[in-house]
Amino acid sequence: MQTAESTPTMSQLEKVLYTAKTHTTGGRANGSVRSSDGHLEITLSTPGTVDRGTNPEQLFAAGWSACFEGAMGIAARKMRITLPADLAIDAEVDLCTADGAYFLRARLNVSVPGVEREVAQTLVDTAHQTCPYSKAIRGNVDVVINVI
């Protein structure tokens, strides 16, 4: 039985902007995931196999890089900079093991063609401080972000 003192609480917030809802069965090995709105329906498979389907690491890489690009857009608007149309982020998420425990390691390789390297680095640094995915994994996942 939980008491009021032991009940977990969520962070104070101003407003919930969006809630993603998914239903998963079968887990990472031959499972499936679908969203409540029907926009996402995928098959899962174990990383490194030839089975058809994706895996949680690929999904995380896709979500983080998309969110990070959005955070770069916000930073660019504040700095009054126009991001190039061919801005690209290659995300790499490693599933690792050490001493029998699993963990993640991640890299973002950010290409900002036509933007001075110092300015691009400032955009990336700012985005890494504001991106919700970056915040969520800060201190929990080894991260390297490269401006390429």
Image (cartoon, helix red, strand yellow):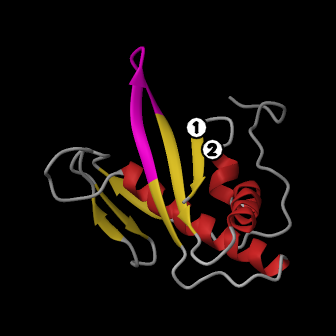
Q: Which mark is residue 137?
A: 2
Classify 10 Å Cα crowding around label 2: few (below 14), some (14-19), many (20 and above). Answer: some
Residue 84 vertical position relative to residue 119 in the rendered view, above or below:
below
| Residue 97, horizontal then vertical, whole percent | 39, 25
Could you tell me the amino acid type at mark 1? Val
Task: Tell me the quarter of the picture where residue 141 sits.
Answer: top right
- Taking the spot 52% from the left edge, 57% from the top edge, the residue there is 109
Q: CA distance from mark 1 to mark 2?
A: 6 Å
In this rendered view, identify the residue nearer to me: 53 or 148: 148
| Residue 89, horizontal then vertical, whole percent | 51, 65
Residue 57 vertical position relative to residue 69 in the rendered view, above or below:
above
- What residue sits right under mark 1 in the picture? 141
- Taking the spot 51% from the left edge, 81% from the top edge, the residue there is 86
Q: Which residues are magenta?
A: 92-103
Relative side of 126 to 72, left or right: right
Q: Secondary structure at mark 2?
A: helix
Q: Secondary structure at mark 1?
A: loop
- Taking the spot 48% from the left edge, 37% from the top edge, the residue there is 104
- Taking the spot 57% from the left edge, 75% from the top edge, the residue there is 113
Answer yes or no: do the residues labelled 1 and 2 have beta carbons within 8 Å? yes
Give the quadrant of the C terminus.
Answer: bottom right
Could you tell me the amino acid type at mark 2? Ile
Farthest residue to the top: give it.
Answer: 99
